[in-house]
Amino acid sequence: MELTYKHTEIYDWVGDEELRTSITKSINEIEKSKTLLRKNNYEPVISEILGWKDKRDRHKDAELHDGTGIEVKKNSSTSFILDAVRYAEMYYGACDNGIHLFINFKSGKIHQINRIMIVPNWMVVRMMIPDQDMADSALTMYNKRKEMDQGLNCQALLNVTRMINKFNNM
C-alpha cells in the first residue's frame, strides 16, 4: 500500500493498519525530536515516541506490544546500508515474523521525513540474500574472520527506488 501523509510518502507491505496509523501520527514528533540527525543510538527515542519497547538486539531494535520485533533503519540519502551477515543469519531463521521500518529524511534547515517503508523481515531478507549460496558465502567469510580474531564489514548499499520496485514485485 502506498499513501502520502503531508510531506511523507508511506509504503506499507505489512498491511497492519494500526501500526501504520501509529507511525503516521508520530512523524511530526519524530521530526521535532531531531533524533534522526544522530549518527547512532536513535532507536530508543523512536521506540519511545511510538510506544514500543526498546529492545536493541542483533536483529531488532524494538518490540511491539505483541512481541513482534522491529528493526529501525534511517538515512538521509537515497540509499540504505545493510549488513549481509545479519541477513544471512536471518535467512537461516535467526529472526522470524519481524518488521523493518525504513525512514528516509531530509536534514538541514528543513528536517523532514520524506519517506517511510514498513516491510516484513522476510521481504528484506529475500532482497538481501536471494539464495542459500549467498547466505553461506556471507557466513563463511564472517566465521573465518572470527577464527582469525577479526571482524567483517560485509555491507550492501541499497537504492530506495530499487528497494520499492523489488518489494512491489514480491
Image (tube, grey):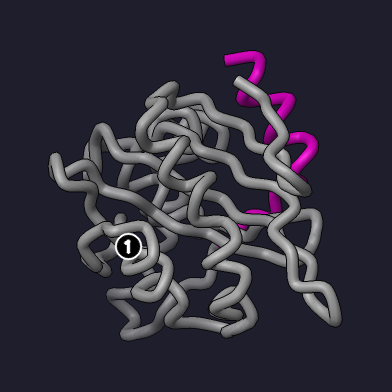
The residue drawn where x is 44% and y is 22% is 15
Q: Which residues are magenta?
A: 155-170
Badge 1 marks a residue whose secondary structure is: loop
In this rendered view, identify the residue nearer to me: 48 or 97: 48
Which image quadrant is residue 49 in? bottom left
Task: Check disc 1: other Cα within 10 Å, few if <14, some if 14-19, many if 20+.
Answer: many
Relative horizontal placement of residue 168, taking residue 110 as reference (left or right):
left
What percent of the width, then of the height, locates residue 69? Answer: 26, 48
* Quadrant where the N terminus is found in the figure: top right
Is 78 above or below relative to 55?
above
The residue drawn where x is 64% and y is 37% is 10
Is 170 above or below relative to 4?
above
Q: Residue 43 colored magenta?
A: no
* Quadrant where the C terminus is found in the figure: top right
Going by the picture, which residue comes out furthest to the top? Answer: 169
What percent of the width, then of the height, locates residue 59? Answer: 30, 56
Going by the picture, which residue comes out furthest to the right? Answer: 109
What percent of the width, then of the height, locates residue 70? Answer: 33, 50
Residue type at mark 1? Asp
Which image quadrant is residue 103 in? bottom right
The residue drawn where x is 41% and y is 44% is 22
In this rendered view, identify the residue nearer to me: 23 or 87: 23
What percent of the width, then of the height, locates residue 113? Answer: 69, 58
The residue drawn where x is 49% and y is 35% is 119
In this rendered view, identify the residue nearer to me: 112 or 12: 112
What residue sits right under mark 1 in the picture? 61
Which image quadrant is residue 168 in? top right
Is 99 above or below relative to 12?
below
